[in-house]
Image: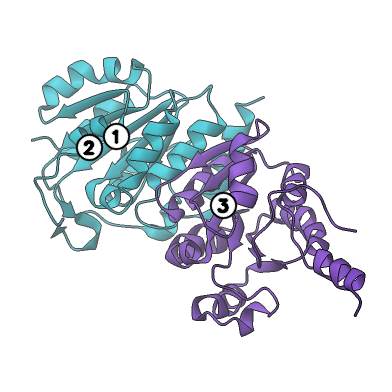
Amino acid sequence: MMKRDECFRILARHIKDEAVVATYSSAVDWVEINPRPLNYLSIGAMGLDSSHGLGLALGRPDKRVIVLQGDGSLLMNLGSLVTIAAVAPKNLVHLVAQNDSYEANGSQPIPNPKVDFTGIARASGYAACFDFSDLRIFEQQVAHMLEQEGPVFATLHIEPTKPLKYDYPSLYDPEKRKAFKAQWRERSQ
Amino acid sequence: MDARAQDVDAGARELHGGAIIAAIKASGIEYVLAVPDIVTSSGLLAPIARDKDFRLIRVCKEDECIGIASGLSYCDKRALILIQYTGFLDSLNAIRGVAVEYKQPICMMVGLLGHDPEKEPRASPRYGVRIIEPILDDMGIAHHLIGLDADIGKIQPAIEQAYRDSQPVALLIGRRPKPSSRISS
């Protein structure tokens, strides 16, 4: 088992000009570790993170898009795995932090903690699939994973971490959306 | 009414998919995000699927379209969401969050399954259709009924305004569009 913030610290060392789509607990951890304009945080409804990521990846095939999704969110939009695999954006990396709970909603359990997200992604047709539960192995393989032709999927098996403070007004600040759009556009010129 | 007058009247009360597709293209739409809807299946979705000017993304569930269209809008790419009213109702929370609260240019073309095209949607025999316009009004979403060829001229200005002002719009398809591109005169 790993800790989400430890995984994200390792991931952050490999981030350059990618868009990072993150929500809820993943967003709280990610923003604390790597605040930057190219974080896309305003998802609007639980589960849509992967779909926003697909739209960004389609619209900017020259740039990589990384989705940091929770297991509860993915369960609310499980069909997006099938859609993403069919569209097959080479520039999309889809990471799911699995702690078997709806952490942002009181840490209630997901319906079935035995669910194998990596297996579902593989069966859906993702080009490259990974499953990490050891931080040392994740650290060794993260660069290799990010270099794969997408869509790439990985499950990060994590344990519950410290209680988080969910500052939603800050996460969903319209100024952050404007900043993202400005920088994302700027890089297309 | 003589036979010719009846024929002209019948022709005027048609809706042609080819003309709708032409209006969609004129609006700069590149991506069509769709879940099949029997109202628009043969007249719109089938020809769009064959049209190389569009990139058709078939999704599993309608609310995916809202996220995908939002992501595309940040890349200055225009998308049209082609769904049935049932899928619109199923996606209301996504539409609330992304389209309304975040003021994103989410353009929806919604087939009114079971609607009597000779009636206004609010007077539709089907409950699910009757509630669509009141819901859109409550959410402050602009909407236009596309029930006749004469309504097709509303499509391009509505989509242009949605992208210019960064706001959602719903285009309600009130009768099955004919696959033909011909518009009766």
- Please state which amino acid type lies under the numbered disc 2: Ile
* CA separation in Å, label 2 and label 3: 30 Å
Name the residue nearer the viewer: A115 or A161: A115
- Chain B shade in the render: purple
Q: Which mark is residue A120?
A: 2
Q: Which mark is residue A124?
A: 1
- Position of residue A160 relative to residue B118, above or below, is above
Residue B176 is left or right of residue B97, and the answer is right
Of badges 1 and 3, the one in the foreground is 3
Q: Which mark is residue A32?
A: none
Name the residue nearer the viewer: A50 or B121: B121
Check the picture and name the quadrant holding the C terminus of chain B.
Answer: bottom right
x then y, percent, for residue B51:
65, 35
* CA separation in Å, label 2 and label 1: 6 Å
Tell me the crowding category of disc 1: few under 14, some 14 to 19, or many 20 or more residues within 10 angstroms, Cα based.
some
Furthest residue toward bottom: B123
x then y, percent, for residue A130:
21, 26
Q: Chain of mark 1?
A: A
Of badges 2 and 3, the one in the foreground is 3
Where on the picture, by quarter, is residue A22? Answer: top left
x then y, percent, for residue A91:
44, 24
**How many numbered marks appear?**
3
Check the picture and name the quadrant holding the N terminus of chain B.
Answer: bottom right
Tell me the crowding category of disc 3: few under 14, some 14 to 19, or many 20 or more residues within 10 angstroms, Cα based.
many
- Please state which amino acid type lies under the numbered disc 1: Ser
- Chain A shade in the render: cyan
* CA separation in Å, label 1 and label 3: 25 Å
| Residue designated by label 3 | B41
Name the residue nearer the viewer: B31 or B11: B11
